Image: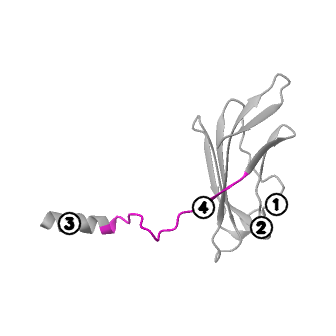
Amino acid sequence: MNRYILLGVVFLLTGCPGPMDPVPLEHRAKATVSDNRVCITVPAREGERIFSVQFGNDTGQEVYKTFSRTDEQIPAVRGECLSVFGFEFRPGNTYAVFYRLEKSRSEPGRVFAARFSLEQGRNGRLRLIEKP
């Protein structure tokens, strides 16, 4: 009997997800190549700023940055390329890119994601292939 009580207590304390736990909704970002560089655009709303970014590829290269102070956050503008913060995208790799945009601390942010691979043509131009 004590084992069942202990098991129940452990289950309650572990914080297992329940039906009312929020799950962040992921929105689609658009990845393209512009001037032979990767360009990520999102349908940003007026006043949204970049709160965090995460870039990673299939070889294990990963960068994660958070900008918790408002003065560090960069505005996101609809239709304009978002900053990649010096991350190097190279041909032959598959990438996943995530941006979290926030308007204010009181409003929930939005997460945008793009998944793609890069290839380099004979002429040296990059070609981007979007992944589902």
Instruction: Give me the C-alpha separation between circle 2 and circle 4.
Output: 16 Å
- Asked whether disc 4 touches disc 1, contact meaning CB atoms under 8 Å apart, the reply is no
70, above or below 131, in the image? below
**For the residue marked with disc 3, what is the amino acid?**
Leu
Residue 65, quarter of the rendered image: bottom right
**For the residue marked with disc 1, what is the amino acid?**
Arg
Label located before the other in sequence (4 or 3): 3
Q: What element carries label 1?
A: loop
Q: What element carries label 4?
A: loop
Circle 3 is placed at which residue position? 6
Circle 1 is placed at which residue position? 78
Label located before the other in sequence (2 or 3): 3
8, above or below 65, in the image? below
**For the residue marked with disc 2, what is the amino acid?**
Arg
Q: Is the magenta stretch mostly helix, strand or loop?
A: loop
On-image quarter of the N terminus:
bottom left
Instruction: Give me the C-alpha separation between circle 4 and circle 3.
Output: 35 Å
Q: Which of marks 4 and 3 is in front?
A: 4
What is the span of residues highlighted in magenta in the rendered image? 12-29
Circle 2 is placed at which residue position? 45
Circle 4 is placed at which residue position? 25
Q: Is mark 2 on a helix, strand or loop?
A: loop
Label located before the other in sequence (1 or 3): 3
User: Would you call the spot at circle 4 few (<14 residues within 10 Å), some (14-19), or many (20 or more)?
Assistant: few
**For the residue marked with disc 4, what is the amino acid?**
Leu
Instruction: Give me the C-alpha separation between circle 1 and circle 2.
Output: 7 Å
Q: What is the x, y in percent for residue 128?
A: 75, 37
- Asked whether disc 2 touches disc 3, contact meaning CB atoms under 8 Å apart, the reply is no
Instruction: Give me the C-alpha separation between circle 4 and circle 1.
Output: 19 Å
- Asked whether disc 1 touches disc 2, contact meaning CB atoms under 8 Å apart, the reply is yes
Query: What residue appears at the point 72 percent right and 52 percent down from the top-left corner?
Result: 29
